[in-house]
Amino acid sequence: MKRTFIALFSLLILASLVLTACGPKTTPTPEPVATEAPSEEPVATEAPAEPAAVEKTVVVGFTASLTGKYEVSSTRQTNGLKLWMDQVNAAGGVKLADGTVITFESKFYDDESSTDRVQELYTKLATEDNADFLISPYSSGLTAAAAVIAEQYGKVMITTGAASDSVYKQGYTLVYQAYTPSSRYLTGAVDALANADPDAKKIAIVYENAKFSTGVVEAMKAYAESKGYEIVLFEGYDKDTTDFNPIINKVANAQPDAVMGGGHFQDGSAFAKQLYEKNIESIKFVALLVAPPEPTFAELGDAAVGVVGPSQWEPLAAYTPDFGPTSVEFEDAYKAAYGEEPSYHSAGGYVAGLILQKAIETAGSLDTDALIAALDAMDMTTFYGDIQFDTSEELHGLQIGHSMVYIQWQKDADGNLVKQVIWPLGGATAELIYPIR
C-alpha cells in the first residue's frame, strides 16, 4: 500500500512539471544586487568634439607708389600696413564668434604715383583679384580716384595718407578716413604762431598745386584771415618744381613774419633748403606740410632747424590705447622689421589695418552691412590717437576723432637734430624756437 502511494505521488509531481512547461513563460524578477554608494565626482565622459575651426584668408588690396613722387611716403605707409598684417597672422588671425579664423594676405601693384594707373589697378583688384577689402594709395589725389572704384564695386576701403576733405563729400558709404582732414592740417600752426608772437600779422603761403596741399592752404588761409592775419602772398607751384628761387624772391619782397604751405616730401625739402639759403630777415616762423615730420628731413642739416611740420602721429605723443599696441611697442616692432624710425606715414598704414581688424571683430563677420555698422559706431583710441567717423550723409566716413600734433626740428645738448612736439601746449616736449634764426 505504501509503495503504491509513493508511486502515485511521484506521478502527480511529474504531471505538474509537464503542465508548467506548457504554460506561458514569465521573466523572473531579479534579486536586488548590492551596489556601492554613488561617487561624489561625476562619471567622466568624453566631451563631444568641437567642430574644426574654419580658416578663411581675406585679401586686402591696394596700390603703392614704388616709383614716382610719392615713393618715400608711400613706401613707409605700405611698411606699416604690412607690419600690422604680419603681426595679426603671427598671432593666429582674427577669430569670429562662429569659430571662423580670419587671416590676411595682400595683393598690391605699383601705381607709379599716377592717377590713371590707380583707376586701372583698383578696378583689377576689385574684379579680377576679388579683393575682400581695399586700402587707399598714398595721397589725396590718388585716393580720390580709388574711392570711386571702391564704391562702384561695393568694397569697404580704409583710406590713409589721404587727408583731403573733398573725398568724403561725394556721398560715399564705404570709404573711411584714418587721417585728420586737410582742413585742420595747418590751422594749429596759425595758433602756435599767435601764441608765440601776438604782434606777427603777415603770412606768405607757398604751396604745391595739388589736390591735397591746395585744400590745406585754402582752409588755413580762411582760418588765418578770421584771426586777423594778412596774407601777403598766396603762390602755387607746379608739382615738378625744383628751383624755388623765383618764388622765394616774391617772398622776400612781401616781407612776411611767417611762411606756411608746402606739398610733399621732395618739393617741401627743396623749398626749405633754398629758403634757408636766402636768409630772409623778416621770417620768424616756417611751417610746411609732409616733409618736416619725415626722419630724413634732418639730412638738410642747419636748414632743417626751426622748421615746423604738422604730423598725424609722433612717438612722443603718448596716447593710452584701448585697442592695439602702444606707441613704444609699435615703434620697436617697426624698427626691428625695417631698420629705421617709423614716420607718421608708417603709423597711418598700421592704423588702417587696426581699423579694419576692429571692424571685423565688432561685426563678428565679413558681411558688408555689418562692417559698415561697426565702422559707423567705432570710437576707439589707438597708439595713433582717437578714431571716430562722421556718419552724416554729407560727410560720411570723414575722420572726426583724430587731431594733429606739430613738431619742430631742434638741436639737443650734443648738437644732434631731434624732433620736438611744440603744439598743442598740453603735449609739448619743448618750447617753440622763435624766431627761427
Image (cartoon, helix red, strand yellow):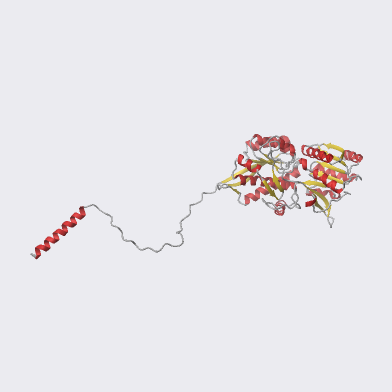
Left or right: 417 as drawn, with respect to 376? right
Q: Would residue 77 be visible to someone looking at this image?
A: yes
Nearer to me, 36 or 336: 36
Residue 6 pos. (x, y %): 12, 63
Q: Quadrant of the N terminus?
A: bottom left
Question: Residue drawn 80% across and 46% down?
Answer: 309
- Residue 39 in percent (x, y) is at 44, 62
Q: How many marks?
A: 0
Q: Residue furthest left?
A: 1
Left or right of 27 on screen, residue 100 = right
Observer able to see residue 69: no
Q: Position of residue 25 (x, y in %)?
A: 25, 53
Residue 355 horizontal/vertical position (percent): 67, 45
Q: Nearer the viewer, residue 345 or 255?
A: 255
Quarter location, residue 115: top right
Q: Is residue 37 left or right of residue 140?
A: left
Q: Quadrant of residue 241?
A: top right
Residue beneath the point at 82% across and 45% down:
191
